[in-house]
Image (tube, helix red, strand yellow):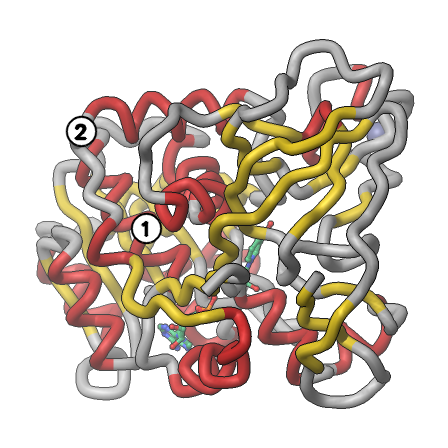
Amino acid sequence: MNVVMKEKAEKGGVFTTKEIPVPKSNEVLVKIHATSICGTDAHIYNWDEWSQSRIKPPYVMGHEFAGEVVEIGKDVKAIKLGDIVSAETHIVCEVCEFCKTGQAHICKDTQILGVDVDGTYAEYVAIPEANAWVNPKGVDPAYLAVQEPLGNAVHTVMEGEIVGKSIAVVGCGPIGIMSVAVAKAVGASKVIAVEVNEYRLNLAKELGADVVINPMEEDPIQRVLDETDGLGVDIVAEMSGNARAIDQGLKYLKLGGRMSMLGIPNDKISLDVANDIVFKGITIQGIAGRKMYKTWYQVKGLIESGNLDLEPIITHRLPMEDFEKGFELMESGNCGKVVLYPDS
Ligand code: NAD
Ligand code: ZN
């Protein structure tokens, strides 16, 4: 089968061939219809410091996908041949304290598809049955593939009160623009998008942001205060990982507000803990992955509600062979979700 491999400990990836995997007794083999590029894949492609410490080449990249189950292991119970599945990409141990207390999304022995084990930039992937998420039939596979990052957005936006609340989505990469759409769909009172890239600011607008702010062009703190009667926003959904943006977000967050942090800074950062956290009485929440599987049911419900338009989020569709073009787009920032097709 055709695959995109991270072959060596260096920048890039290689379009090559590999044996079709044989599913283990608890696994299903999926023929991949569509697979999308995640920021994590871009980190691995660019071979940044995090990748160097985590990734063990050679292996197959990619983790967001949808496809058809074509073979099942002998112990598989619920998944059937012909099912159209996506997957929760955190493969968890099921026996640690966290897995046993309904917190599998922070399992201490998590393995990630396309990070720690062979992934989905391939014609086929074998995944544990437990990770397979059965989709309705007849839906555009690109929409199904992006449910995983959409789950990150849903987890961040919905991990506290949101109906009737104002929210600033900081960093409108693919997950940020999805967060804008989710916040609008579930009834936030005002959605403010903060982003430095104009292409992505426009996407945020298209997805329903009430206010867009480019912090390179105006003071985001002043503008958010102006937009919120001088009080600040109820919620900051931090999706930039940018130190300055995080510091500013804490300043325009309302007293008693919620700071939900998904973005991953590439270094330690310095914050005014006394004034911006303690005395403001705010809550800071780390958001890791998706709740298993509460978030997936929320994603399903939102999609079925018809209130979420995923089409503007998917900005580019390419044959898998053109993956390098996909990574260039990701590098430029002039894209939303880029979807690859192994079969075209
Ligand atoms: P992305 O890198 O495409 O998006 C980040 C966006 O932030 C970019 O559009 C960038 O232009 C913008 N940005 C940079 N500096 C900014 C600033 N000062 N103010 C406003 N915006 C700024 O990433 P993504 O795929 O959308 O993911 C969002 C973040 O979440 C990333 O940091 C990613 O690593 C992280 N992530 C976390 C989890 C998790 O489980 N916690 C899962 C997936 C992704
Ligand atoms: Zn565990």
Residue drawn at 60 percent across, 37 percent down: 87
Front position in the image: 8 or 276:
8
Q: Which quarter of the picture shows residue 56?
A: bottom right
The three-letter amino acid code for the residue at tag 2 is Gly
Q: Is residue 301 above or below residue 58?
A: above
Q: Secondary structure at mark 1?
A: helix
Q: Is residue 122 above or below residue 128?
A: below
Q: Which mark is residue 339?
A: none
Label 1: how many Cα within 10 Å (few below 14, some 14–19, many 20+) = many
Q: Which residue is mark 2?
A: 306
Chain-order first, disc 1 or disc 2: 1
In this view, the mark in front (1 or 2): 2
Residue drawn at 22 percent across, 35 percent down: 165
Cα–Cα span, label 1 and label 2: 14 Å
Residue 77 falls left or right of residue 25: left
Residue drawn at 54 percent across, 61 percent down: 342
Q: Quadrant of the N terminus?
A: bottom right
Q: Which quarter of the picture shows residue 194?
A: bottom left
- How many numbered marks appear? 2
Residue 42 falls left or right of residue 200: right
Label 2: how many Cα within 10 Å (few below 14, some 14–19, many 20+) = few
The three-letter amino acid code for the residue at tag 1 is Met
Q: Quadrant of the C terminus?
A: bottom left
